[in-house]
Image: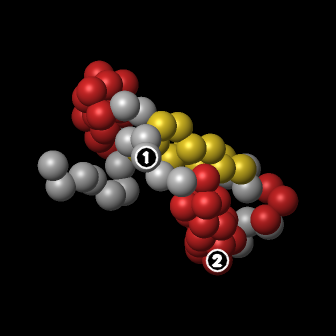
Amino acid sequence: MPHVVVKMFPGRTQEQKEELSEKITQAVMESIGAEERTISIAVEEIPREDWDRLVYQPEIMGKAETLLKKPGY
């Protein structure tokens, strides 16, 4: 607890993904007081052509009531 899943287009380096994971970990620790050992983070690369079907429709539009930050597109 907690587990964070980041879905994004492919193309970032492993180093960029690791830096993102470190920053998310720090933000979670600072904002909700979670211990580092309790945090897990996953990155799922979703091809651009599949984004609407796999992410936007089911997870953004389909769960709009759970969004804390909505996309601007």
Mark 1 Cα shell of 10 Å, populated few (<14), some (14-19), many (≥20): few
Q: Quadrant of residue 25?
A: bottom right
In the rendered image, residue 32, in percent from the top left (x then y), is placed at 64, 69
In front of the other: 43 or 65: 43
Work out whether mark 2 precedes mark 1 in sequence or the reverse, and give the earlier one: 1
Q: Mark 1 — residue?
A: 11
Q: Residue at 43% of width from left, 46% of height from top?
A: 11
In the rendered image, residue 65, in percent from the top left (x then y), is placed at 32, 42
On residue 30, the disc is 2
Q: Residue at 79% of width from left, 66% of height from top?
A: 35
- Label 1, secondary structure: give it: loop
In the rendered image, residue 39, in percent from the top left (x then y), is placed at 73, 55
Query: Most extreme residue toward the left, as rendered?
Result: 73
50 sits to left or right of 37? left
Q: Is residue 53 visible?
A: yes
Q: Quadrant of residue 17?
A: bottom right
Q: Residue at 18% of width from left, 55% of height from top?
A: 72
Mark 2, mark 1: which one is toward the viewer? 1
* Residue 49 higher or lower than 43, as above or below: above
C-alpha span from label 2 to label 1:
29 Å
- Label 2, secondary structure: give it: helix
Question: The disc labelled 2 sits on which kind of residue?
Answer: Glu
* Residue 41 higher or lower than 56, as above or below: below
